[in-house]
Image (cartoon, rainbow, N blue to C red):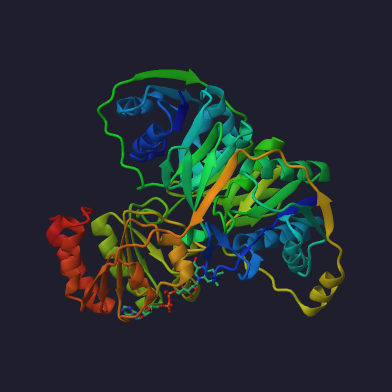
Amino acid sequence: MTETVVIAELSKGKISSTTNELVTAASKLGSNCTIVVPCTESSVANEASNIAGASKVIAAKSDVFANYDASAWAEAIDAVAPSGIIITAASAQSKDLAARLAARRSISVIQDVIEIEGTTLSTPIYSGKAIQNVSVSGNTAISVRANVFAPADNTGNCEVQVIDTTGNVATALKEMVQRASQRLDVSEANIIISGGRGMGTPANFSHLEEIADKLGAAVGASRAAVDTWDEIPHSMQVGQTGKTVNPNLYIAVGISGAIQHLAGMRSSKYIVAINKDADAPIFQHADYGIVATWEDALPVLSSSLSGLLG
Amino acid sequence: MVNIAVLVKQVPDTNSKIQIAGDMVDLSTVKMDISPYDEFAVENALQHKESGGGTVTAITLGGAGADKVLKGVKALGVDNIVRLDADGYMDSNSLQSVLAEEISSGGYDVVYCGKSAADTGAGSTGPGIAERLGWSSVSNVTEISFDGGLTVTSPAEGGNAIIDVSLPAVVSCDKGSIKVRKSNVKGIMMAKRAQVDVKAVSPPASSVTIVSQVMPPAKPAGKKFEGGDAAQTVAQLLRDEANII
Ligand SMILES: Cc1cc2nc3c(=O)[nH]c(=O)nc-3n(C[C@H](O)[C@H](O)[C@H](O)COP(=O)(O)OP(=O)(O)OC[C@H]3O[C@@H](n4cnc5c(N)ncnc54)[C@H](O)[C@@H]3O)c2cc1C
């Protein structure tokens, strides 16, 4: 019986539904699944005990989990997690943690898993231009892309064990700078609407923001937009030298679909493209394409969404 | 005087088309280049040196073909160039063991690397090496200040964390606002004559084997509509067909 250890993914201090997806991934790899919840208050872990398929929840309680410090987190989690296949989310922070945990246990790490077939794991390589299938012997750490595996439902009920743990914090947090806008970052969002050079001016991004607010979406940008306009920060850039995103829905507006942009968003579950050029490469990747200027399409999209979302 | 290492990797140019021959990717006709994020790592390493003196050693792991990338960064002002001579696939455990050994024997104070390599996209090497060495690590760093110690900016939930890092440490670099320098003719001429310090390695066996590399499954053709009014149809499809909104 292969042991699996899911490291819970948290969002705003709560167990995120990505954790349920990780448990589904775990069920494909082994039969005994322990969820480790890194937390400062053990009550956070109670929610995880409902995830069907988990055999046990360990609330790993420590002050070190107040802020991310890679070495302290790896040490504290390693101390309480059983041996087995370690499974984390593929967020930037959790990939980092997976790498440190694997190195700590002298096992290999496989990042961004998108398919599990027996002991064969698939990951995108060359920014998704190809897929690599690998087979693994023995224990390993893997990170699993969001929105790939169906989330396990919350009909379970397993034991929660609270274990105090600690690690040596090696870095010192000087300051947390909150984003000025309340809107999500592209790396955290399940829906993203991005603008490119075709938006014409940075001020026109307000039309994207209006739709983003209706959908609870993040606003992203192409590199051309980021490089051309100072008002569009690099933190919004999606692509090869920006962020790799994997949302349920990606709406590309005035973006041509250059290979380096596709590198960051092609694995989105649904892609909508709005572009005035019917031959723009982005349409080859779009589930729904609208050949129109954004000036024509966005007001209609906005009012239709208002109608649908009430 | 800080002893700085920067890890660089040769990868296919990001514009290149990836093709499969048999059941593996065929890179024989693909133009190779330094991985984009490594360029930021090199720039940060050079700025670190310039802030208070020291040496910068660029380290790569690969076959002789990877010397080109080392010469490229030598032309930018890196002091020493080292290639750990290895070819073929290594899993993260073997790769990091070899690199950590080299970092440890080189007596480095700080290691810069790109946040991930453009081929695997994994981003495991920096934090993995740090763990093996018992060092701290900060990843996806966008800004660095060298005034009175190392202070970095790295994304955190809801914003950015500004973090003081004590050495030794591994810093994995994202793009940020720094401009990377370009090489000049003098640098390129000097790099041509520079010797690559080639070192043999003996990596532990890999526990991961590549079974195959394949093209991604073709996406079913999408629906394409003409005119802005179609946005209403698409909104409806996002609800009824995609179940997203
Ligand atoms: C090493 C490297 C790394 C890179 N990394 C990235 C990266 O991370 N992310 C990234 O995005 N790019 C990246 N690029 C750049 C990439 O190659 C493209 O140049 C860039 O993506 C183009 O951005 P764009 O689509 O906004 O602009 P363009 O290619 O100029 O496209 C603008 C589009 O807008 C459409 N349009 C114009 N007006 C309207 C209108 N009124 N309504 C609707 N549509 C309109 C046009 O038809 C066109 O298709 C990288 C390049 C290199 C070499």
Q: Is residue A23 above or below residue B232?
A: above
Q: Is residue B15 above or below residue A246?
A: below
Query: Outermost residue toward the front?
Result: B22
Q: Is residue B179 above or below residue A143?
A: below
The residue located at (50%, 20%) in the rendering is A164
| A96 to the left or right of A117 | right
Residue B47: which quarter of the image? Answer: bottom right
| Ligand 1 location (quadrant) | bottom left
Residue B204: which quarter of the image? Answer: top right
Can residue B239 be seen here? The reply is: yes
The residue located at (47%, 43%) in the rendering is A121
The residue located at (65%, 67%) in the rendering is B33
Quadrant location, the N terminus of chain A: top left
| A182 to the left or right of B223 | right
Q: Of B62 and B52, which appears nearest the observer?
A: B62
From the top left corner, tell me how far across and down residue A259 is, in percent: 47, 70
From the top left corner, tell me how far across and down residue B227 is, in percent: 20, 79
From the top left corner, tell me how far across and down residue A243 is, in percent: 47, 58
